Image (cartoon, helix red, strand yellow):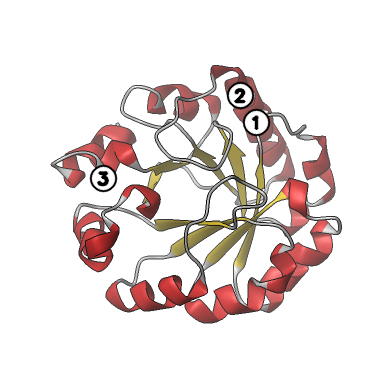
Amino acid sequence: MISDIKVAPSILAADFSRLGEEIIAVEKAGADMIHLDVMDGHFVPNITFGPVVIKSIRKVTNLPFDSHLMIENPEKYIGDVADAGVDILTVQMETCVHLQKVLSQIHECGMKAGVAMNPHTPTEFLEYVMEDLELILVLTVNPGFGGQKLVKSVVPKIRKVREMIDRSGRDIYLEVDGGINSKTCKTVIEAGANLLVAGSAIFGTKNYKSAIEDLRK
């Protein structure tokens, strides 16, 4: 089972005028993955980037790309994202009418599959797709923008998902994203998270290595 804490810096908080350099910098600082938030301006009130940008930055690092599609109709773009070099692809549970079919499509394209849940979304739906998952993302803010504060009422949900993963006996990452920093990381780790997404808590500091180490501690 996955036991050590992994850190995935979210490039949403990086300096996009020097994005390649930023990714190289966090890799040297000890990042385990690079987190890519793809937003379409429909499911969430923000627009970020897509497969073209992902393909261009794939050239600068060998770290796994952990991409979170916060978009409507994600099944239309799975092939493009796979071709761009994504390793783990997470879709929003709320956008998938046929979730199991979408997860199968992700696997068919050679990627690991994840599902994300907004703070208000019940965990019960996970029971029916647990065998199809390598990652579960519990959002600890309402998605769309970086720099938000962690919604503390979601912490019990992290514990519940951890119990579900443990019962399944499967090697599934429990990822958290939203308001994760050196103060809140202890709370989510104690609740069962083992993959931390952090944006401004890393890219908003002068020492990326120290910031990543602080999250792991």
**Which residue is identified by label 3?**
203
Q: Is residue 20 left or right of residue 81?
A: left
Kind of residue sitting beneath label 1: Pro
Quarter of the image where one finds residue 76: bottom right
Q: Position of residue 121 (x, y in %)?
A: 74, 34
Q: Is residue 72 above or below residue 203?
A: below
Q: Position of residue 33 (x, y in %)?
A: 39, 57
Q: Residue at x 76, y 55 (%)?
A: 131
Numbered circle sitting on residue 119: 1
* Residues at circles 2 and 3 in contact by the CB criterion of under 8 Å: no
Kind of residue sitting beneath label 3: Phe
Element under disc 3: helix
* Residues at circles 1 and 2 in contact by the CB criterion of under 8 Å: yes
Element under disc 2: helix
Work out whether mark 1 precedes mark 2 in sequence or the reverse, and give the earlier one: 1
Kind of residue sitting beneath label 2: Val
In the image shown, does 73 or 165 lie closer to the viewer?
73
Q: CA distance from mark 1 to mark 2?
A: 6 Å
Q: Position of residue 82 (x, y in %)?
A: 57, 76
Residue extending furthest left?
206
**Which residue is identified by label 2?**
154
